[in-house]
Image (cartoon, helix red, strand yellow):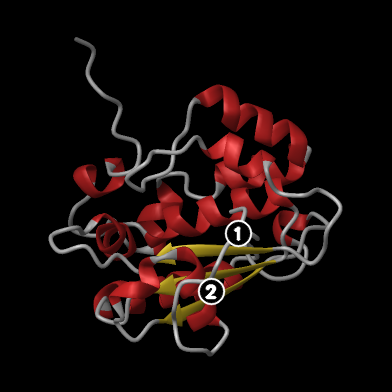
Amino acid sequence: MAEEARVVTRRLREFPEDSWTSKRALDDGAYESARKATTTMEPDELIELVKTSGLRGRGGAGFPTGMKWAFVPKDVFPKYIVINHDEGEPGTFKDRELAESDPHQLIEGIIIAAWANRAEKAFIYCRGEFALGSRRLDAAINEAYDNGFLGKGIFGSDFDLDIVLHRGAGAYICGEESALLDSLEGHRGQPRLRPPFPAV
């Protein structure tokens, strides 16, 4: 049986003492895929690449990412990317681990997703109890702005992207996508009747 390629946790395993720092991430090639995507690929081309790659979400269903991105209407603006980083299942720490260990990888993924979906604003809804992860994410976002990876004309392109880090209050129900959106909008987080369905 072939060994599984552990892409998401590679930096953490190889550099456990400083995997989360911008220096380590940049020395290890962070943001190069985002640079390539935003400066050499059209959004539809990127979606097709992600479809053929077989990339799947990290949630329980493992939904194909390219297929999910293809659901997003092309001619409706503005668009927003919302990252559900509110992991509430007992004993589940994949989101926290990524924020604490490699926040720049998360930001790079957001840049790529935003470019593919033509979104100019992203929100990371982070579980309030993830204090260390929140601090590291916040620092990484600020460093990404300082390096020109976020904000106006990222990577010298005509693409603008802003990321907002929102800390939740720890309500388990806010892990459900529509309740999360309610909470993000400043309301009490509770599931909405559907349709409409959030696309991404």
Q: Which of 64 and 36 is in front in this view?
A: 64
Mark 2–mark 1 Cα distance, whole angstroms, equals 9 Å
Q: Which residue is drawn at 72% across and 65% down?
A: 120
| Left or right of 112 in this view: 103 | left
Would you identify the image quadrant in which residue 122 lies? bottom right
Q: Residue 45 carries which label?
A: none
x then y, percent, for residue 36? 66, 40
Would you identify the image quadrant in which residue 18 lies? bottom left
Would you identify the image quadrant in which residue 67 lies? top right
| Left or right of 41 in this view: 170 | left
| Left or right of 107 in this view: 35 | right
Q: Nearer the viewer, residue 49 or 103?
A: 49
Q: Which mark is residue 198?
A: 1
x then y, percent, for residue 71? 68, 43
Q: Nearer the viewer, residue 149 or 173?
A: 173
Q: Which of 28 and 9 is in front in this view?
A: 9
- Residue type at mark 1? Pro
Residue 41 visible (yes or no): no
Among numbered discs 2 and 1, the one appearing first in the sequence: 2
What residue is pinned by disc 2? 181
- Disc 2 + disc 1, Cβ < 8 Å: yes
Q: Residue at x 50, y 35 (%)?
A: 64
